[in-house]
Amino acid sequence: MNEMTRPTPATTPADWASDQEVRWCPGCGDYAILKAVQKTMPELGADPARTVFISGIGCSSRFPYYMETYGFHTIHGRAPAIATGVKLANPELDVWIVTGDGDGLSIGGNHMLHLLRRNLDCQVLLFNNEIYGLTKGQYSPTSREGTTSPSTPWGSVERPVFPCEFALGAGARFIARVIDTAQKQMPQVLRRAYEHRGTSFVEITQNCVVYNDGVFEGFTDKKNAANTQIWLMHGQPMLFANGSKGLRVNHDRLRLEVVDVTDANRHEIVVHDETNKAIAKMLVSMRFPEFPVALGVIFCDPRPHFGAALEAQRAAHAGDTVADLDALLRKGSSWEVKGIGGEG
């Protein structure tokens, strides 16, 4: 859990809302995410004076303007790099990164990969609408094959990036997924992300009403959600469809499969273990509509975070001689240049 070194004043959601006009398209899923975050922060006991939101470029990246905290609206894809500097310079800050599928997984994919493998103590909220909304609807790294857009008028022929699969492959120790409209479950996921020490990666599927409206409707429609979503709970069987269906391991193919639950096979239903990376790989590889969409905390297996490792290294070398940069630059072969400006 993020450590507090002094009493934190009680706050309300209103204390976390800035005086800036929220400027997203009417109906944008970002409104629901903003509301959930502002609602959750007081429940966490967080302190606005020790909280910073850092974003890159894109619709989602306007987020810092709307939070009454410290914030940086940085450059395209570089939010993880800025966040790393902020957290290492002041470890007591709670650092949140807000990014989109294009910002975080295209130009920022390299930075995101290294943030995850280093395991910096921060929270990443990746808004995934499978499109570039700010620049008028071009296809993004997460757009599905066949997506028609201004940059792919005949349909995209690229295989998309799947954010949670990417995060797991990059070495993330906490991976979760939630839906923008899941106002009951999102605060629970955000709390778990906040309590985790290390990089918490949360994919939030977010509807773009202008350029990609309804792209997630197949599994987000509330009328059929029981059959298309599976909310994971540590230590609980992986059941959905009101308990009538579940997931078991097909040992011949080494993958999960959907089965109708009966008394005879109930013992075969997989019990969710957040620390099991092999099962997490199967969960993030499930594709709708063959499978329900896995939601909630998919993987959580903590290890020492980047800042703690650096601090331990610094403490171990506390008595070492302080390096002299000037002496280091002049060590070995060196040259003295004369005659600049016609002299010499």
Image (cartoon, helix red, strand yellow):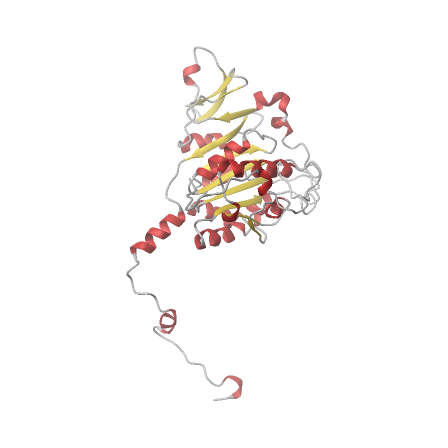
Query: 288 left or right of 268?
Result: right
Identify the image quadrant of residue 273.
top left
Query: 51 left or right of 327?
Result: right
How many marks the image carries: the answer is 0
* 79 w.r.t. 10: above or below: below
In this view, the residue farthest toward the left is 319
Say which residue appears at 44% left-offset and 41% top-offset: 172
Quarter of the figure with the N terminus: top left
Say which residue appears at 51% left-offset and 53% top-offset: 82
Image spot of residue 129 (x, y percent): 62, 38
Image spot of residue 295 (x, y percent): 52, 29
In this view, the residue farthest toward the top is 263
* 206 w.r.t. 293: above or below: below
Q: Is residue 24 visible?
A: yes
Query: 63 left or right of 302?
Result: right
Q: Is residue 291 visible?
A: no
Say which residue appears at 50% left-offset and 44% top-offset: 47
* 158 w.r.t. 239: above or below: below
Image spot of residue 228 (x, y percent): 57, 24
Choose between 12 and 92: the one closer to the eye: 12
Image spot of residue 306 (x, y percent): 40, 48
